[in-house]
Image (cartoon, rainbow, N blue to C red):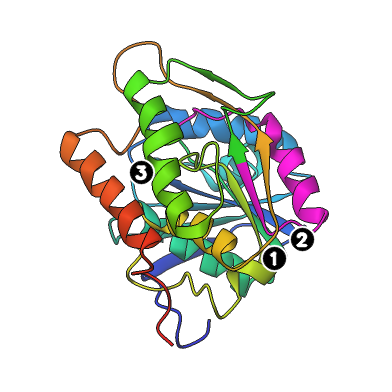
Amino acid sequence: MPDDWDVPEYEPRVLQSKTSKYCIVTATWNEGDKCVNQYLQMARYSSEIDFIVVNRGEELISLDESFLTRKLCIRNLLQVNEPGQSSAYRTGLAFAMARGYEGVIMIDSNGKDDVSAIPSFVQNLENGNDLVQGSRFMRGGFHENTPFYRIIAIRLVAAMILWLGCKYWYTDQNNGFKGFSRKFLLDDRIRPFRKVFRRHNLQVYLNYAAAKHGFTIVQIPTSRVYPSEGHLASKIQSVGQHIHHLGDYLEISMGKHNPKG
């Protein structure tokens, strides 16, 4: 990797060789069985896209290698210790770029997203789009059990803050189901492999930067379903975490995370 990329230390396990132009990067941490169940569903698309998993928990370490490769179709397993969702995705994206992939799809490992949209992401990257954003709120999309306060925060508050910075209106920018072209991720105006992206700000920044610098963006319908009861499947739960995340939007829209020079 280039010397100016700041990527957390990680232990790579290359389980299978690269077979596709595109890959999925997903990060898992304390997801329990949800991530394994999701990977079993994603395995249906292993003939058209490679899977890279960034693991910070214990979910996958103890699994037999034949199960990881034959059932879950995981090609690369990256074990990281540095905390933060953005740190994990920074690691996975950098690894994917170093391996020569032409595009990357990011998806959370908490089982909320309908993975049947994966071929649509691949097709839109193949068509030359630089950012493919999944949206549960656009025509054709679907969502269920989304807390009302989150709908207001996503569709009005966060969307407006981001629009003020980049003049592009996203219908579901918080949705972690996204695709990026190699051209976009390696553009010197973007530089996503910086230590400032640690908690939950990298995905927000990438949406901002794609619009700010005139890259080709498309939003596609996806489905997101929250559990009907019990623990909310999200790493952002407390009032303080929500305030901090809105602060990320403000800082990014004000250009505070733009590359120097």
Where residue 215 appears, as percent x and y from the top left, is 66, 63
Q: Residue at x 50, y 33 (%)?
A: 36
- What is the quadrant of residue 254 in the picture? bottom left
- What is the quadrant of residue 70 in the picture? top right
Q: Alpha carbon of mark 2 to alpha carbon of mark 3: how far?
A: 27 Å
Judge by depth and name the residue closer to the eye, 134 or 68: 134
Whether pointer 2 and pointer 1 mark residues with C-beta atoms closer than 8 Å, the reply is yes
Q: Which residue is mark 1?
A: 101
Q: Earlier in the sequence, mark 2 or mark 1?
A: 2
Q: Earlier in the sequence, mark 3 or mark 1?
A: 3
Q: Which residue is mark 2?
A: 21
Q: Residue at x 49, y 27 (%)?
A: 112
113 inside magenta stretch: yes
Q: Is residue 136 left or right of residue 181?
A: left
Q: Is residue 125 left or right of residue 154?
A: right
Q: Amino acid at mark 2?
A: Lys
Q: Which residues are magenta?
A: 110-133
Q: Earlier in the sequence, mark 2 or mark 3?
A: 2
Q: How dense is the environment of label 1, judged by Cα within 10 Å: few (below 14), some, or many (20 and up)?
A: some
Q: Amino acid at mark 1?
A: Tyr
231 inside magenta stretch: no
Q: Amino acid at mark 3?
A: Trp
Q: How dense is the environment of label 3, judged by Cα within 10 Å: few (below 14), some, or many (20 and up)?
A: many
Q: Residue at x 75, y 54 (%)?
A: 125
Q: Which residue is mark 3?
A: 29
Question: Is there any visible trace of residue 62 in the rendered image?
Answer: no
The secondary element bearing badge 1 is classed as loop
